Amino acid sequence: MTKERSLVIIKPDGVQRGLIGEIISRIERTGLKIVSMKMIMADEDTLWKHYNKDDVWFQDKGEIVVKNRTEQGLPVEKEALEYGKDILRANIEFMTAGPVLAMVIQGNQAVGVVKKLVGGTEPLTSDVGTIRGDLTIDTYELANASGRAVRNLIHCSDEVSEAERELALWFTEDEVIKYRLANERILYDVNLDGILE
């Protein structure tokens, strides 16, 4: 359990706003550790694989877009499936707009702990105390009106199986460093041997 891993990507808005240190600090303060990290320019092919959506997802999301456009009196100019794909196209355009910082985070319940720290997808509805809730103010409404992706600073894996799939896209096992932190004794040692002199 202490070796569970999550993928975290600080998105272009987080990098450009100088929030890398703040975000890493919040993660490290939990006791989780970074076992790999790299600043890269994400490529479109990797991002399509990363988001891993199928036609059912595109259709469902596209139908919501069509419904919203109809309710707002806007023209419906394409099939629902294409509107759904536009959502992912906007995310990919955003993620390739500048450098990102990709990290492998490891520790007990890494996926769940990071997800709790990050907060909900939309910053407006993310809880106070979360990265998205505290550090950005974007909304679905503003993003949709601007025809762009929500700028929510960070990506994290939603579940363990997803983390395993995503990590394989962004990192090789050779890039992951196996090491111990001193604080792991406090977090994981059963009887805390060696603390007293």
Image: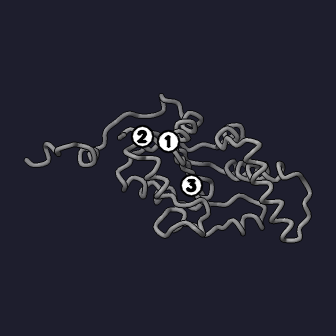
Label 1 to label 2: alpha-carbon separation: 8 Å
Camera-side mark, 1 or 2: 1
Is 149 situated left or right of 16 in this image?
Answer: right
Q: Are marks 1 and 2 in contact (CB under 8 Å)?
A: yes
- Name the secondary structure under disc 3: strand
Name the kind of residue labelled 1 in the image.
Val
Mark 2 closeness class: few <14, some 14–19, many ≥20 residues within 10 Å: some
**Residue 128, image x and y in percent?**
49, 70
Name the kind of residue labelled 3 in the image.
Ile
- Name the secondary structure under disc 2: loop
The answer to whether residue 181 is above or below residue 61 is: above
Which comes sooner in the sequence, label 2 or label 3? 2
Camera-side mark, 3 or 1: 1
Camera-side mark, 2 or 3: 2
Mark 1 closeness class: few <14, some 14–19, many ≥20 residues within 10 Å: some
Residue 151 or residue 87, whichever sits in front: 87
**Residue 105, image x and y in percent?**
45, 44
Q: Which residue bears the numbered disc 1?
A: 160
